[in-house]
Each structure stands twice: as C-alpha cells, then as structure tokens.
Image: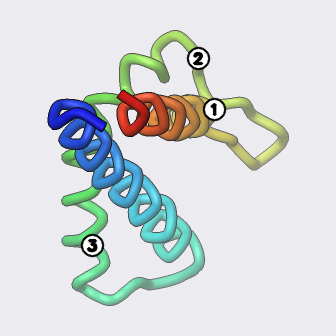
C-alpha cells in the first residue's frame, strides 16, 4: 500500500463514518425531540457531507413513496465511498 493510497483510504474512512453519523442523527431527529447536542452534531455532519451529496441529489432526487422519501443520493454516495476506499487501500 502506498502512502497516497493509505491517506486517501483513511480520508474516505472518515467520510464514511461522518455519513453513518449523519444517518443516525437524522433518524434521531425524525424519531422525536433530540437533545441540544444532537442539533449541533447534525449540523456538523451535514456541513461536511452535503457538498458531496447535493450534486448527486440534483441528478437523482429522493424517491417518494407516499409520505416516505428515500434519499437515493445518500445511498449512492455511501456505496461509492466504500468502493473508492477499497480501491485506495489497494493502491
């Protein structure tokens, strides 16, 4: 594994962890009244992940099924980050 591959792999790992945190914090926000720290943590995760997800969301809007909306852009970016992480660590 090269230095560049290792650094890119760890950066992508941090991004994946941020996306997982965003997902959990979004679920907490939907489930009820979250504590104050959750609002700050949710804003932080959105600040760092939204610039990557927003362009994909413009091309692929959320899929609506009644009152439920599934954000396919989040799913695509998450899977792409996993694949890129795997490639980066194999360099």
Q: Quadrant of residue 1?
A: top left
* Category of crowding for the residue at label 3, using alpha-carbon neighbours closer than 10 angstroms: few (below 14), some (14–19), many (at least 20): some
Q: Indicate the quadrant containing the C terminus: top left, top right, bottom left or bottom right.
A: top left
Residue at the spot x=32%, y=29% of the render? 52
**Number of other residues with Cα within 10 Å of mark 1, as a class: few under 14, some 14 to 19, many 20 or more:** some
How much space separates mark 3 and mark 2, taking CA atoms? 27 Å
CA gap between label 1 and label 3 equals 23 Å
Relative to 14, residue 3 above or below:
above
* Residue 1 marker: none
Q: How is the image coloured?
A: rainbow
- Which x, y percent locates residue 54? 37, 26
Q: Which residue is mark 2?
A: 60
The answer to the question of whether label 1 and label 2 lie on touching residues, with beta carbons closer than 8 A, is yes
Which residue carries the number 1 mark?
72
Label 1 vs 2, first from the N-terminus: 2
Lower position in the chain sequence, tag 1 or tag 3 = 3
């Amino acid at each position: 594994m090269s230095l560049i591959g290792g650094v890119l792999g760890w950066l992508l790992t941090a991004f994946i962890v941020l996306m997982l945190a965003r997902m959990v914090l979004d679920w907490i926000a939907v489930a009820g009244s979250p504590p104050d720290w959750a609002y700050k943590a949710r804003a932080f995760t959105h600040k760092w992940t939204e610039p990557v997800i927003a362009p994909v969301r413009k091309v692929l809007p959320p899929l609506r099924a009644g009152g439920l909306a599934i954000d396919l852009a989040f799913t695509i970016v998450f899977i792409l980050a996993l694949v890129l992480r795997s490639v980066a660590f194999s360099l």
